[in-house]
Image (cartoon, rainbow, N blue to C red):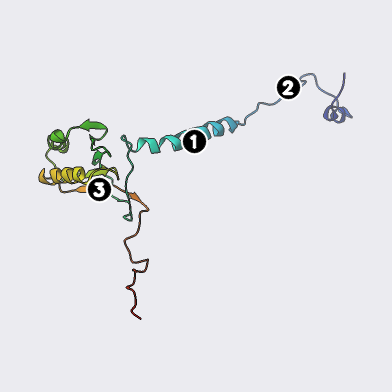
Amino acid sequence: MALSANDAFGAVGKRRSRRGRGRRGALSEINVTPLVDVMLVLLIIFMISAPLLTSGVSIELPKTEAGAMQDQSEPITLTIKADGALFVGETPIPFGALKPRLEAMASGGYDKPIYVRADGKASYEVVARVMAALSTGGFSKINLITDTGGPSSGATTAAPSEPQAK
């Protein structure tokens, strides 16, 4: 029988008792490595899926220099796709049924904010008709949703100068 280095040095000068032979103390530590692994996988899954949950209809928003809004009370989201199709939330709706549907959703309270998400390639005519229908329907809190990072309207570039006469 071969002895390990610990057994060989531990056995020198000591007698082993029969009672404690082969027994070890209870392991009272929790192995957190599997817990950390599972948490990292869940974090990655949520980071990937969170942007997909923000909006139901995929469109390309135009970019402007306006910042993000701070008020986040349950708004009505109206989406206009590039082909002119209208969606209330994720439900497609014809233009003629837009005003009655929004009035039913507002349930008499026209102070509820409406967020209009129009594709950057959508026709100006369609967007103007929707905005006019909303304002004539009594809605006063109408917001256009855009992406940030668009061109600045400030005077950061020099205006083209007139040719100088010689």
Q: From mark 2 to mark 1, how far is it between C-alphas?
A: 43 Å
Q: Give the numbered dot on residue 23.
A: 2
Q: Is residue 112 above or below residue 94?
A: below
Dot placed on the residue nearer the N-terminal end, 2 or 1:
2
Q: Looking at the picture, how far across and down is residue 51, in whole percent?
A: 39, 38
Which residue lies most toward the bottom here? 166
Which residue lies most toward the front here? 166
Disc 2 or disc 3, which is closer to the eye? Answer: 3
State the SS at label 2. Answer: loop
Residue that badge 3 annotates:
144
Disc 2 or disc 1, which is closer to the eye? Answer: 1
Q: Looking at the picture, how far across and down is residue 68, in whole percent?
A: 32, 51
Q: Quadrant of residue 56?
A: top left
| Residue name at image x 23 percent, y 48 percent | 143
Tell me, yes or no, whether the two marked residues, 2 and 1, touch with CB atoms within 8 Å. Answer: no
- Nearer to the camera, 111 or 160: 160
Amino acid at dot 1? Ile
Dot placed on the residue nearer the N-terminal end, 2 or 3:
2
Q: Quadrant of the C terminus?
A: bottom left
Q: Is residue 152 above or below residue 135?
A: below
Q: In the image, is 26 to the left or to the right of 144? A: right
| Residue name at image x 89 percent, y 29 percent | 12
Q: From mark 2 to mark 3, how far is it between C-alphas?
A: 73 Å
| Residue name at image x 16 percent, y 38 percent | 106
Q: From mark 3 to mark 1, how far is it between C-alphas?
A: 32 Å
State the SS at label 3. Answer: strand
Q: Quadrant of residue 24?
A: top right
Residue that badge 1 annotates:
44
Amino acid at dot 3? Leu
